[in-house]
């Protein structure tokens, strides 16, 4: 049975949290999962048999008996003291000691998770800060698009910097990063010469197979391994994501510790005790009721890249066999001035998952201005975070009044342990949700269609143009 609880934050702010009977008396989770007004939408949750369905999906996942069972390596996160973590950490420290900038080449899961974590856990515009004021080398990304303008801009920024490259690709054959690597490798060779360039490139790739593995061995590049049993969109807490994070100055052992805590917390199939599974069930029940779009909304701009990671995770995992919730994202309060009208008064085919951070670790007070020229002195002495929180609470209330279901995820604070927890929460929720939906959450057969058409137009050998 679910019960309401009030949690008081410094300054008298009240956070309403949904608590289960089994959670009472336990240490609070790093991530609180709530569904205000759940009764409006969840009356049929017991009659629909969601607990039994969640149990079956859990058994498939942990028994490795469901579709895509060979891709479950992420289910047990790396231990912070694992030998592989030591190797990743040492590699990152070496880059930090030598380079002013790291160029990460990858697309999809090969870059999105690293970018998400770095943007969440470093200051805004950190690449523009002097090296002494940053946590580590500036980190830039290439290979996630086919824009000549973007490629030229990145290489121009790096022209006067001491650069190393981390190319992340299991196969080495994906068009965007493969093309970016070819261009960046040529650029580096002109900048440093072939021998020195070889010392400055690290390939994160398959252990034994693939074009990138062969190229790295031929050129003498250092390598890290993407595990055979982890697909790209679930690889954020492997070397694919951890090396760039470590170079940026993030504590990757703390990230993994957070993921391990989440793994333990979300290991039970009981919906009352497992917020991750409740989220998966809630979104599937809402989908059953005709809510076909999930809007991930965050009130911190630092979540923009995280939302891109989340969109790939759920979009590739669930959008198949004519099924799936369309994953979209919004940045509040910014997008309240663009999408707010549609959300409030448009078709009732969406629900929101709202990310809120209870303690951001940064604050700015509203000053008092003589004469109150802008009419804002009623906010003088209050924090910007207080204003943001009232916008959050007011928006949730208004959207609920407009019959838009709101699932609320409250992260206690932004640090490595909490972010590691959040990554794992969504990975496991996505896997369970896919099984509840009746699809394989670990393949992506639909992406081949556009690639085949593109290759035909490009005249790639072996395609029918």
Image: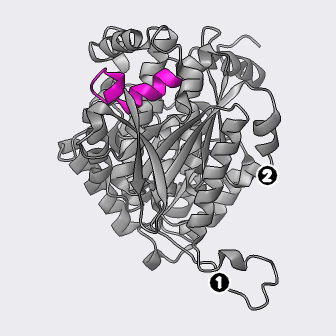
Q: Residue 322: tell me if it is visible.
A: yes
Residue 354, percent from left and from top? 57, 42
- Picture disc at residue 51: none
Disc 2 is placed on an element classified as helix
Among numbered discs 2 and 1, the one appearing first in the sequence: 2
| Residue found farthest to the bottom | 370
Q: Nearer the viewer, mark 2 or mark 1?
A: 1
Task: Report if residue 448 lies within the magenta region.
Answer: no
The N terminus sits in image quarter: top left
Mark 1 and mark 2 in contact (Cβ < 8 Å)?
no
Q: Residue 441: tell me if it is visible.
A: no
Marks 2 and 1, how far apart at CA: 25 Å
Disc 1 is placed on an element classified as loop
Which contiguous range is marked in magenta? 265-282
The C terminus sits in image quarter: top right
Q: In the picture shown, does residue 151 fall above or below 136?
A: above
Residue 393, percent from left and from top? 60, 51
Q: Which residue is mark 2?
A: 337
Q: Residue at x 69, y 59 (%)?
A: 153
């Amino acid at each position: 049975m679910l019960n309401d609880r009030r949690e008081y934050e410094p300054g008298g702010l009240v956070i309403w949290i949904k608590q289960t009977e089994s959670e009472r008396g336990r240490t609070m989770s790093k991530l609180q999962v709530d569904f205000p007004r759940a009764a409006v939408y969840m009356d049929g949750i017991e009659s629909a048999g969601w607990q039994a369905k969640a149990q079956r999906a859990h058994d498939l996942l942990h028994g490795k008996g469901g579709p895509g069972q060979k891709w479950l390596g992420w289910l047990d996160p790396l231990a912070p003291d694992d030998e592989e973590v030591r190797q990743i950490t040492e590699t990152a420290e070496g880059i930090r000691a030598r380079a002013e900038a790291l160029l990460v080449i990858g697309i999809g899961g090969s870059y999105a998770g690293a970018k998400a974590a770095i943007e969440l856990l470093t200051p805004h515009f950190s690449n523009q800060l002097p090296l002494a004021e940053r946590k580590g080398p500036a980190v830039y990304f290439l290979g996630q698009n086919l824009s000549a303008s973007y490629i030229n801009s990145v290489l121009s920024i790096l022209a006067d910097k001491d650069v190393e490259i981390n190319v992340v690709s299991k196969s080495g054959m994906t068009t965007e990063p493969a093309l970016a690597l070819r261009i960046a490798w040529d650029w580096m060779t002109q900048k440093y010469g072939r021998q020195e360039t070889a010392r400055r490139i690290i390939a994160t790739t398959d252990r034994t197979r693939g074009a990138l593995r062969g190229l790295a061995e031929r050129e003498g590049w250092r390598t890290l391994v993407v595990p055979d049993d982890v697909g790209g969109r679930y690889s954020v807490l492997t070397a694919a994501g951890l090396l760039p994070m470590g170079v940026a100055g993030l504590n990757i052992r703390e990230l993994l510790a957070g993921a391990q805590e989440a793994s333990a917390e979300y290991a039970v199939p009981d919906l009352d005790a497992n917020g991750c599974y409740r989220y998966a069930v809630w979104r599937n029940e809402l989908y059953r009721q005709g809510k076909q779009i999930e809007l991930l909304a965050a009130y911190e701009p630092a979540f923009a890249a995280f939302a891109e990671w989340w969109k790939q995770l759920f979009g590739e995992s669930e959008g198949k066999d004519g099924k799936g919730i369309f994953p979209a994202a919004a940045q509040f309060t910014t997008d309240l001035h663009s999408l707010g009208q549609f959300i409030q008064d448009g078709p009732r085919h969406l629900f929101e998952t709202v990310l809120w951070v209870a303690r951001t670790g940064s604050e700015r007070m509203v000053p008092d201005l003589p004469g109150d020229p802008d009419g804002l002195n009623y906010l003088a002495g209050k924090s910007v975070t207080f204003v943001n929180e009232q916008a959050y609470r007011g928006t949730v209330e208004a959207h609920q009044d407009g019959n838009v279901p709101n699932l609320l995820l409250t992260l206690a604070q932004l640090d490595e342990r909490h972010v590691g927890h959040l990554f794992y929460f969504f990975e496991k929720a996505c896997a369970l949700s896919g099984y509840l939906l009746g699809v394989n959450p670990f393949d992506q057969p639909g992406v081949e269609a556009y690639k085949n058409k593109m290759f035909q137009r490009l005249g790639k050998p072996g395609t029918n143009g």
